[in-house]
Image: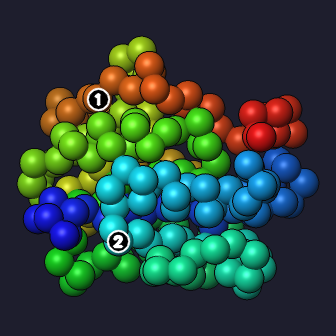
Amino acid sequence: MTRTEDEIAGLVLAAGGGRRLGGRPKALLAHRGRPLVEHAVGILRAAGCERVHVVLGARSAEVRQRAALAGCVLVENPFWERGMGSSLRAGLDSLAGTGVRAALVLLVDQPGVSAEAVARVRAAYRDEGSLVSAAYDGVRGHPVLLGAAHWDGVAESAAGDRGARAYLRAHERSITLVECGDVARAYDIDTEADLGHLE
């Protein structure tokens, strides 16, 4: 494993209950014949992340049973109903003390984000002070790389479904934007209408 591979961990946020999808957890939605959470892990691994942590919440026992997540660190978020912020905090907490210096955060409900886009964001990592975000036609999106120096600040500001949004907005000038609009699509699977994006 190279130095960079050892320092950057993939972090999949996959705890949501799919409230606007009739209570179907997004992690279990089928995409290309497998659960979305499995797809997300595969994207991170294809982009070079050897260590992958997955935050689970809604119907986590079923997710563990149905998705092939061997080799991942599975993190339970008992507070998943409070929103994405709680999952981001749980994921960052799980990385503390591991020697990892940056978390590459991927949302389970964005299957249009390609391994190439993730690899581009990952390649912009410099050190634990790095803040890197994919951009789509210049607009910041996911995935996001959070250097370890920012984890406490991100965790402190993460609330509800905002995740790292408030922290990133406050540190806009420090973010390295990496254009990914040519290799990925940044849609979310939030509503019944969005299910048409799944294959």
The residue depicted at 68 percent of the width and 56 percent of the height is 36
The type of colouring in the image is rainbow
Q: Which residue is at the front of the view, 72 or 193? A: 72
Give residue 178's mark.
1
Say whether disc 2 or disc 1 marks the residue closer to the N-terminus. Answer: 2
Classify residue 198 by image quadrant.
top right
The residue depicted at 54 percent of the width and 51 percent of the height is 107
Residue 109 in picture, x, y percent from top left = 64, 48
Image quadrant holding the C terminus, namely top right
Distance, label 2 to label 1, CA atoms, is 22 Å
Indicate which label's residue lies in the foreground, 2 or 1: 2
Dot 2: element:
loop
Q: Which residue is at the front of the view, 196 or 59? A: 196
Image quadrant holding the N terminus, namely bottom left
**Which residue is under mark 2?**
51
- Is residue 184 shown left or right of residue 169? right
Q: Residues within 10 Å of mark 1 (few under 14, many from 20)?
A: many
Q: Which residue is at the front of the view, 187 or 164? A: 187
Residue 156 in picture, x, y percent from top left = 34, 63
